[in-house]
Amino acid sequence: MNDTHSAYTDDDGNPRLRHSVTGFLDVLGFSHLSTRSTDRAETQRTLEMIATAIRDARAFARDTLGDSPLADPSRWSLKFFSDNLVFGFPIDAAGSSPGEIAWFAVRCVQRYQLRMALGGYFVRGAASAGDVCLTDEIIFGPALIECYRLETKASIVPRVVLTEPLRALLHDALDSPQARAANARQAICRDIDGWWFINYLDAARTPTGIDWDLITRHKTSVLASLAGTTQHDVLPKFGWACRYHNVFCHWHREDPGFTESHRIDRTDERSTISRLADSTTG
C-alpha cells in the first residue's frame, strides 16, 4: 500500500470518477485513545504509538504483496485522516480483471488489519465496488458514502464488511490467480447477522502453514484490549474479537503447531461465523 493520487486524475490533473474497489476503515476506540489523558506527554506517546502501528501495518502489506504487478503504486489511491483510511483501486482499466483486483484488495486489507491488531489497534470498516474519486483535494463518490454508512451501522465490531456488489465480484472470480493466492475460500466469512467480512487472521497463513506465533500475539492483543477497556459500549466489540479468534483456532485445530494454548479461554469457538469454504451455495 502506497500513497498516490494519480489514479483518479486525468491527463490535465482534473479529478475523475472511476469504477473501483474501495473501502473506508477506522480504528476502534480511537476517540477514547485521543482523550483518555489530559497529560500532553502521554497523549504524545499515544500518538507516536498509533503512527508506528500504521507505518508497520502498511509496510507489512507492502512487503508481503510487493511482488504482485497489482502493487504498482500508480494503480492505487490511499488517504489517511485522523483514525480513518480510505482506499481506492480502479477496476475500469485494462491489464487486470476486476475480480483479480478485488481479491488483491482483500489480501491488502487482511494484512493491514492483522498488523494493526498485533499493535493493539483493531480495525473496522466496509469495502465495496462502485464509482469513486480519491485525490489529495477530494474524496467523493457513492461507493465511499456506502462504505462510510456501513462502517457506522453494520461493521460495529472489528470487522471489515463487504457490500453485495463486492461480494459478488469476489465470488465470480474464485478461480482467478489472485483468488488462489488469497486462499479465497478461507479469506471471507459470513457472520451470525448475515454480513460477509474479511477473515484477517488468515493473513497469518504462510506457505508452510499457520504462523501460530502471530495467532498468539493476536490473543495477547485481544486480552490486553479487553483488560484496558472500561467503556461498556466497547467491551462487547472486543468480546466479538475473542469469539472470532477462537473460531479461527477451531477451524485450524488440526493444523500442525496448534495447541489449546492458542485459544482464548472461552467456550464459543463453535459459532455461526462461517467461511465461504463451509458453504456450497455461494
Image (spheres, rainbow, N blue to C red):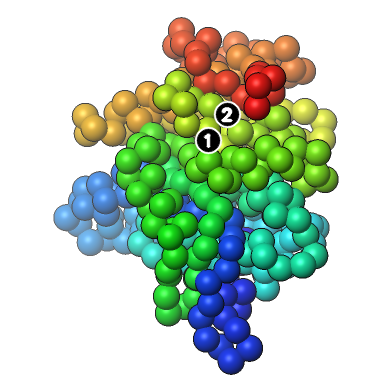
Residue occupying the point 26% across, 51% down: 31
Q: The disc labelled 1 sits on which kind of residue?
A: Phe
View extreme (bottom): residue: 12
Residue occupying the point 57% across, 81% down: 9
Question: Can residue 232 be seen?
Answer: yes
Relative side of 164 to 96, left or right:
left
- Image height check: is 225 above or below 140? above
- Image height check: is 113 above or below 56? above
| Circle count | 2
View extreme (left): residue: 38
Relative side of 33 to 251, left or right:
left
Q: Position of residue 40 (x, y in %)?
A: 23, 61
Between discs 1 and 2, the one toward the N terminus: 2
Pointer 1 with pointer 2, Cβ within 8 A: yes
Q: Position of residue 64 (x, y in %)?
A: 72, 51
The residue that label 1 is drawn on is 197
- Image height check: is 87 above or below 215? below
Residue occupying the point 62% across, 24% down: 275
Relative side of 210 to 267, left or right:
right
Q: Position of residue 82 (x, y in %)?
A: 35, 62
Q: The disc labelled 2 sits on which kind of residue?
A: Cys
The residue that label 2 is drawn on is 189
Q: Position of residue 144 (x, y in %)?
A: 44, 58
